[in-house]
Image: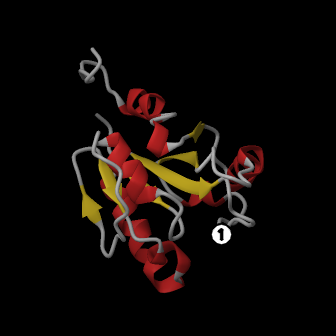
Amino acid sequence: MKKIILMGRSESGKTTLTQALKGERIEYRKTQYINYFDVVIDTPGEYIQTKQLGYALALYAYEADIVGLLLAATEQYSLYPPNITCMVNREVVGIVTKINEKGADPKRAERWLRITGCKKIFFVDSKKQEGIPEILEYLREEGDRMPWD
């Protein structure tokens, strides 16, 4: 399987998505440091919210095959600048989280991620497992077996 690093601001749903991708029970945990798992690298939101820590994310991106930029559908603005994906020599996908929450606007989040440069966008509700199989399938490489195979 390809390895994905999840990046996004605090409370965008990175750890919840990590738990869903791993098939774990969803429970709130504040990520304090970079966490490595089989196919996921979970990062603290503060890393993307702080310029100096953002450089660390650029370095950690080299340990993954794919960079996943998360943006909650409930966000009122995007932290990501236009066309930022060209700064990484990895594939970058957009992941819209919290798509079923009150006040969610998944299409707005999708537009922002497309402006950022993401060509592939996933829509997920980690608590309902919505969109999780699609991400796992995207991470699959030829010969990989999935739990549902």
Which residue is located at x 49 percent, y 57 percent?
13
Residue 79 lies left or right of residue 115; in this view the side is left
> Which corner quadrant of the image does residue 140 belong to?
top left
Q: Amino acid at mark 1?
A: Leu
Residue in the foreground of this view, choosing between 50 and 60: 50
| Residue positioned most to the front | 102
Q: Please, what secondary structure does the residue beneath circle 1 have?
A: loop
Q: In the rendering, at what x and y percent does residue 24 appear?
A: 27, 45
Please report the residue visible at 36 percent of the width from the left and 71 percent of the height from the top: 30
Q: Position of residue 123 (x, y in %)?
A: 59, 39
Q: Residue at x 67, y 50 (%)?
A: 117
Picture layout, residue 12 above or below residue 53: above
Q: Nearer the viewer, residue 122 or 129?
A: 129
Vertical placement of 110 versus 132: above or below?
below
Count the marks: how many? 1
Q: Which residue is mark 1?
A: 79
Left/right of residue 130 with respect to residue 140 in the rendered view: right
Residue found farthest to the top: 149
Name the colouring of the figure: secondary structure
| Quadrant placement of the N terminus | top left
Q: Position of residue 87 (x, y in %)?
A: 56, 60
- Give left or right: position of 9 versus 136: right
- Write the residue at 30% across / 68% down: 34
Image quarter where the C terminus lies is top left
Q: Which quadrant of the figure has residue 61? A: bottom left
Estimate how packed mark 1 is, as few (under 14), some (14 to 19) or many (20 or more) residues with alpha carbons within 10 Å: few
